[in-house]
Image (cartoon, rainbow, N blue to C red):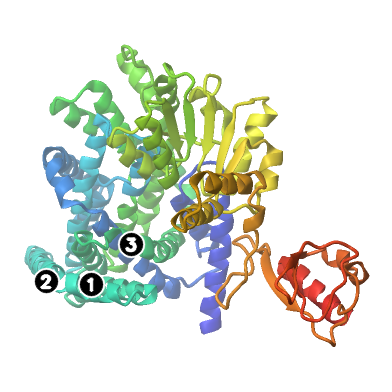
Amino acid sequence: MAEGIFTKVLILLFASVVASAIFRRVHIPPILAYLCVGLIVGPGAMGVIDNEGSIRFLAEFGVVFLLFSLGLEFSLPKMMALRRTVFGLGGLQVLICSVITFAISVAVGVSIEESIVLAGALSLSSTAVVSKELSSRNELHKPHGQLTIGILLFQDIAAVLFLILVPALASNAEDELLTSVGLTLAKGVGIFALLLACGKWLLPPLFNEVAKTRSEEVFVLTVLLVALMAAALTHHFGLSMALGAFIAGMMLSETNYRHQIEADIRPFRDLLLGLFFITVGMTLNLKNLLAHWDLILLCSASLVIGKAALIFALTRATKNSKRDSITTGLYLAQGGEFGFALFALGFSSGIISESVSGIMIPTIVVSITLTPLLINFAPVISEKLFGKRKKEVHKHDYKDQLNEASAELSEHAILCGFGRVGQTISRFLAKESLPYIAVDIDSVRVNEASAAGENVYYGDASRLDILKLLGLDRAKLLVVSYNDLNVAKKILHTLRENDYTIPVLIRTRDDSSLEELLEAGATEIIPETMEASLMLASHALTMMGTPAPQVFKRISETRKQRYQILHGYYHGISSKMIDDKGRPLEQLHAVQLTKSCFATGKYLSNLKLEKAGNPVEMIKHIDGTESTPYPTLKLTIGDTLILHGNSEQIESAENLILGG
């Protein structure tokens, strides 16, 4: 039994890795990769996994962690700031879309219970896909971005309400349906109040105590315990586990630990959510898809066009511009991941039939697939319908934003990366009134910094076209502050292969790739650890009374010698022997000569240390004097050889010194 489950999970993981890699290459959301994996390996196609029950048990936790993450991101202050959009526009969109879907479903012969689930599922859009697109395009603070986020916020609230309703719809007696729904809502409100009270009075002191342990394991275990206990509580009272997880996320969103919790929970969420989407894919039947492809395409087109038209009409009715209205409509025209969750819950409760889910799940899949395309063409569609925007064509294109932002800059600095180091440099440049423009691939950081008025934009600095838009031909300096050394190398190769001679200043962690970067065309390299050591050394010399000019001279000489004096150090029990890429680190090691050593009484040239890379850096004599190594130096008892190199070189040299 256990071996069977292990084999199934192994097959799914392998297929998911391959499918995700392929889908990412063509810029299709990974959700669709998981659905395709489920379809292919499931009983409806190849039948590699014919019993998905054991997998489904794990997959249910994916929805739990998805709702938990959603609760963490749920911001009450943001909701209140956008309350008109959230409760007005968002509420109308969900209500009208649900009523229309319900009416159409009942008209074509679908049962009332199924129609309610369909209404809820199709009224919701994809929070994950749309918010990611808005963030990557730096459009969260634009009018259509605010409209989109406001509507998504209400959809998230509505998703929770539908998750409460679905279990109640499983009641067989139609005359008891109203009573069952009312009772379920009452239980939901009661549990909601209970958990919020726990969140206000119990969780803050609990997490304060956990934080004092300074243990990542205890912290993560506590987070998992809180999420799963809340899910278990709602499940015990006949409600969805996802509801409890969402409330738990809301409870923790107002604490100081929100961001740490979100980072810790992401690996569990992504893995289990992937399994959930795979199990959704397993419910599909390939023969059924091929037999009803025309109906699926018709439903998909109806969903996308109808939803876009409805949202456009509502946003226009609330006095928003035509362009913002059509853009918002196109951004939210798809179905969402909560639709899959509702269908899965309805299917397990016996509400949704296989024939209905076999049509509607592919409909949502097709609509999500079309989303990146619709978002890319939203400015073009807007222009075709309403003409060109005055003074601002394709404002939504981040390349146009870069071009416009750098149009008046010259003799400026281009900052590639706007993390801690990039921001520090920008502040010093601003103090001296020196022009600069920054670019970063982290959309969250760009949004935060640009909202504060910083001159930073979203973009990939390793691409020549992006650098040109930043005014590369007119710039005076290019600073690369990315922590990823491969990005720095890529930028250097891009510049030098295209004959750009602009000075390039690169920040690195250490000097392990110093020569490689210099050969690639870097003008100057600043290793963080080396510079920190120099700063400490300069302060120590100054506080010990060394004259400032002498301190400056020493530091300058060290930099000119490429930090040679700082290379290697004596390792301790907790020291790392290899770097993050598996390369051996340089170290210092002392070998003292005794009477029985092979090297005692011999010349340095007799030891054939060139076999070990000549790692002898210095010889310290017993009388306290020191000598630099040279071939005719005779070694005596008590001499200490200071070896400098990686562990393999030092071990080889030590063997030659001690045993010959």
Residue picked out by circle 2? 201
Return the residue nearer the eye: 122 or 522: 522
Query: In the rendered structure, which amino acid carries the disc numbered 1?
Result: Asn
Q: Earlier in the sequence, mark 1 or mark 2?
A: 2
Circle 2/circle 3 CB separation < 8 Å: no
Q: Secondary structure at mark 2?
A: helix
Q: Is residue 308 visible?
A: no
Q: CA distance from mark 2 to mark 3?
A: 20 Å
Q: Earlier in the sequence, mark 2 or mark 3?
A: 2
Labels 3, 1: front one? 1
**Residue at 62% over, 66% down:** 569
Residue picked out by circle 1? 208
Q: Position of residue 535 (x, y in %)?
A: 49, 52
Looking at the image, residue 24 sits to the left or right of residue 152; the answer is right
**Residue at 55% over, 47% down:** 550
Residue picked out by circle 3? 260
Mark 3 packing: few (<14 Cα in 10 Å), some, or many (20+)? few
Query: In the rendered structure, which amino acid carries the disc numbered 3?
Result: Gln
Q: Position of residue 607 (x, y in %)?
A: 89, 71
Return the residue nearer the eye: 653 or 501: 653
Q: CA distance from mark 1 to mark 2?
A: 12 Å
Return the residue nearer the eye: 604 or 386: 604
Query: In the rendered structure, which amino acid carries the disc numbered 2?
Result: Trp
